[in-house]
């Protein structure tokens, strides 16, 4: 359309990439013009870069006033979204453009319409991309916090992080408890051999920097290195406020490009959200590893003990940071267990195991169910959702229904179950307050 307006000339469209402050070739009317590879114009360089920097159109004329070239910045409101360059075709077209203010105004109107369309499309694309990545993070986060093996958590942390943020490389380091050094536990990416060694040397420098800063960062200017890596996002990993490792992603690869782009502030925001899941997953895995070593499990049911559950509740409270409904506790008590044991000790043992099995089968993978007393079970529910009360009521119904249908476990008498719950911070802000409230029976089923 634009080429036709200038007598069969050449029209070229560029899109502006604010992260790298440059215009990139997006389309051209020149036959075969898009086959010459990636073409970029730094902001302020040349006629088109200068017009984009000044945000004002530039017109070049031949001797005699015939318009030869127009560089038109594309502005969506105050936002620079690209540039449109127009090279007039025939001499008659150049002369007509030079004489006709209306013809130049037409080009400016076309540029304005293109800018609005590009700006709207870019905004919609950013919103869609963010929603997609947030959804992917939530899904990956569930897999992460459900994993119990530290090696599996490390593998998922690098692979999922790289895929979600489109990174070419991901490196996870965790502190060795004996040497206190931060050791690479997982790498995901395309590097191998000498390139991998060079990348790891760069990662060591990045890790030192991010541990010193103690906060997630985006690095557009990396420390001196001998790799082709252009940028990185990195974050320290913490457990109870103590540094335990780092996670770094290198080189953002656009889906439709063959070259690396730089990470931006939006990437950093998404990355920080993802790191919060990684921190929780690492902490969970280390807790389970430590619990196995300390035999912090109930021998009869295999569930975590009261001491272990208390540590996990304290950990989640530390992470809550004032958020509403960050966690909830749900309790289940076999109210007549003493009578059952007096009548038949074997029946009491069956009752404990059956209730434990029913509770465990209806909790999420990352919920923590512990046996906190002879007849009592307590479940820690991180991120219970907007209606934790309904979640606990549904759990009580389905467990009670399952137990009621099991005739064998209801001999020599039917089990009497009492359920309670507490939601942070409405029912308490400390572990003692929440546990005390959760032990108060709110639902009874026989």
Image (cartoon, rainbow, N blue to C red):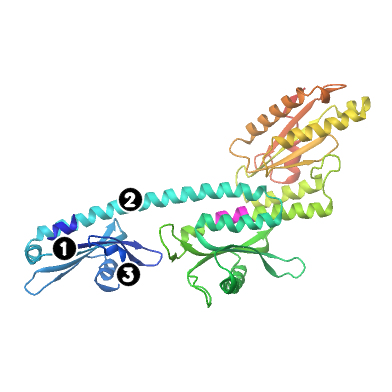
Q: Is residue 296 above or below residue 442?
A: below
Residue in view at x 33 percent, y 64 percent? 24
Counting residues from the start of the chain, the first of labels 3 and 2 encountered is 3
Q: Is residue 179 left or right of residue 16?
A: right
Residues at discs 3 and 1 in contact (Cβ within 8 Å): no
Instruction: Give the quadrant of residue 46.
Output: bottom left
Q: Label 3 vs label 1: CA separation?
A: 24 Å
Q: Secondary structure at mark 2?
A: helix
Q: Nearer the viewer, mark 1 or mark 2?
A: 1
User: In this view of the protein, which residue sits in the foreground, 76 or 3?
Assistant: 3
Q: Secondary structure at mark 1?
A: loop
**Residue on which the image places disc 3:** 43
Q: Is residue 415 left or right of residue 366?
A: right
Query: In what quadrant of the picture does the C terminus appear?
Result: top right
Residue in view at x 72 percent, y 50 percent? 314
Q: Label 1 vs label 2: CA separation?
A: 28 Å
Q: Is residue 42 visible?
A: no
**Residue on which the image places disc 2:** 120
Expressed as whole percent of the image width and height from the top left, the position of residue 147 reads: 68, 50
Residue in view at x 48 percent, y 48 percent? 132
Residue in view at x 32 percent, y 53 percent? 119
Q: Is residue 89 left or right of residue 224?
A: left
Expressed as whole percent of the image width and height from the top left, the position of residue 398 reads: 69, 28
User: In this view of the protein, which residue sits in the foreground, 155 or 278?
Assistant: 155
Expressed as whole percent of the image width and height from the top left, the position of residue 201 reads: 60, 74
Q: Is residue 87 above or below residue 411?
A: below
- Please give the range of residues in magenta: 272-278
Label 2 CA crowd tier, 10 Å (few <14, some 14–19, many 20+): few
Counting residues from the start of the chain, the first of labels 3 and 1 encountered is 1
Counting residues from the start of the chain, the first of labels 1 and 2 encountered is 1
What numbered label is drawn on residue 9? 1
Q: Nearer the viewer, mark 3 or mark 1?
A: 1
């Amino acid at each position: 359309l634009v080429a036709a307006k200038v007598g069969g000339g050449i029209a070229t469209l560029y899109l502006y990439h604010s992260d790298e402050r440059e215009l990139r070739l997006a389309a051209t009317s020149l036959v075969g013009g898009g086959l010459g590879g990636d073409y970029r114009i730094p902001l302020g360089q040349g006629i088109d870069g200068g017009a984009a920097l000044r945000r004002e159109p530039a017109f070049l004329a031949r001797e005699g006033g015939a318009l030869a070239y127009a560089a038109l910045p594309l502005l969506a409101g105050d936002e620079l979204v690209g540039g449109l360059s127009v090279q007039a075709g025939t001499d008659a077209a150049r002369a007509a453009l030079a004489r006709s203010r209306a013809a130049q105004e037409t080009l400016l109107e076309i540029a304005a319409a293109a800018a609005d369309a590009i700006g709207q499309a870019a905004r919609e694309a950013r919103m869609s991309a963010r929603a997609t990545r947030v959804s992917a993070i939530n899904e990956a986060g569930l897999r992460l916090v459900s994993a119990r093996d530290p090696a599996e958590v490390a593998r998922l942390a690098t692979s999922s992080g790289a895929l979600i943020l489109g990174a070419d490389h991901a490196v996870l380091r965790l502190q060795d408890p004996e040497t206190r050094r931060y050791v690479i536990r997982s790498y995901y990416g395309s590097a191998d051999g000498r390139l991998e060694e060079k990348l790891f040397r760069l990662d060591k420098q990045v890790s030192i920097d991010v541990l010193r800063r103690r906060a997630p960062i985006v690095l557009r200017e990396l420390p001196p290195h001998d790799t082709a890596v252009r940028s990185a996002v990195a974050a320290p990993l913490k457990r109870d406020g103590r540094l335990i490792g780092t996670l770094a992603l290198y080189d953002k690869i656009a889906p439709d490009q063959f070259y690396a782009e730089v990470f931006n502030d939006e990437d950093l925001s998404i990355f920080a959200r993802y790191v919060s899941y990684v921190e929780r997953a690492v902490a969970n895995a280390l807790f389970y590893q430590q619990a196995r070593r300390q035999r912090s499990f109930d021998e009869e049911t295999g569930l975590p003990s009261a001491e272990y559950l208390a540590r996990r509740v304290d950990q989640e409270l530390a992470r809550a940071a004032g958020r509403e409904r960050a966690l909830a506790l749900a309790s289940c008590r076999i109210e007549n267990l003493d009578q059952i044991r007096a009548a038949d000790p074997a029946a009491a043992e069956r009752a404990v195991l059956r209730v434990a099995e029913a509770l465990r089968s209806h909790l999420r993978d990352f919920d923590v169910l512990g046996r906190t007393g002879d007849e009592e079970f307590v479940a820690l529910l991180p991120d219970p959702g907007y209606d934790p009360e309904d979640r606990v009521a549904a759990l009580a119904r389905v467990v009670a229904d399952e137990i009621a249908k099991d005739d064998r476990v209801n001999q020599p008498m039917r089990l009497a179950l009492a359920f309670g719950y507490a939601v942070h911070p409405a029912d308490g802000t400390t572990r003692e307050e929440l546990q005390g409230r959760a032990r108060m029976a709110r639902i009874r089923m026989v």
